[in-house]
Amino acid sequence: MHDAAAIPFHLLRPLWLAALVPVAIVLALVLWRQSPEAQWGGVIARHLLKNLIVQPGRRWSVNPAYLVAAGLVLAIVGLSGPTWKRELPPFVEDKAPLMIALALVGVGHREPGQRLVERVARPEVAGDLGTIAGACMGTREGGPA
């Protein structure tokens, strides 16, 4: 016997299945309202109603409420995204190179703020980039862009 985890069936958007609950509730209410007991219950006494209801002959017919419910169930299951093969979205496997440009722009070449940026920000950014594969860092020194 197969394990439930070994079956390769997945739903891409499983929260859509929550829409089946209102469909079931509305179907139950419609079927209850179509019953003769619900239609005549407030007019005729219960003990008389059992004997006055005539059941139609047993011929094959499809209730439109069942057809609408079946269509909604198929639509909801289709919207939930059934698939046999789970694939990661394309943006997850994005291998585009990452580059952070650190601009060291100041009025003078030996401005104290520029040295502070060089001493503090460059090692901090370089440390963060070390954890990202394929990332590099470049700096631009000089006057205004």
Image (tube, helix red, strand yellow):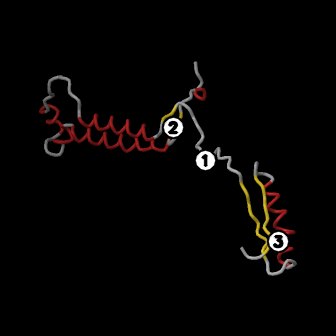
**Quadrant of the rendering where the N terminus is positioned:** top right
Q: Residues within 10 Å of mark 1 (few under 14, many from 20)?
A: few
Q: Give the residue type that dot 3 points to.
A: Val
User: In 3D space, how far apart are the residues under numbered discs 2 and 1 (Cα atoms)?
Assistant: 19 Å
Toward which corner of the image does residue 38 lie, by quadrant? top left
Residue 126 x, y percent position in the rendering: 82, 59
Residue lying farthest bottom? 107
Nearer to me, 75 or 5: 75
- Judged left or right of residue 110, residue 35 is left
Q: Give the residue type that dot 1 points to.
A: Phe
Task: Give the secondary structure at mark 1.
Answer: loop
Toward which corner of the image does residue 70 lie, by quadrant? top left
- Judged left or right of residue 94, residue 105 is right
Nearer to me, 101 or 33: 101
Toward which corner of the image does residue 127 lie, by quadrant? bottom right
Q: Residues within 10 Å of mark 2 (few under 14, many from 20)?
A: some
Residue wearing tag 2: 11
Residue 122 x, y percent position in the rendering: 83, 64
Residue wearing tag 1: 91
User: In 3D space, how far apart are the residues under numbered discs 2 and 3 (Cα atoms)?
Assistant: 49 Å
Mark closest to the chain's N terminus, 2 or 1: 2
Residue wearing tag 3: 117
Task: Give the secondary structure at mark 3.
Answer: helix
Of badges 2 and 1, nearer the viewer stands 1
Nearer to me, 4 or 48: 4
Q: Give the residue type that dot 2 points to.
A: Leu
Mark closest to the chain's N terminus, 2 or 3: 2
**Quadrant of the rendering where the C terminus is positioned:** bottom right
User: In 3D space, how far apart are the residues under numbered discs 1 and 3 (Cα atoms)?
Assistant: 33 Å
Residue 58 x, y percent position in the rendering: 18, 22
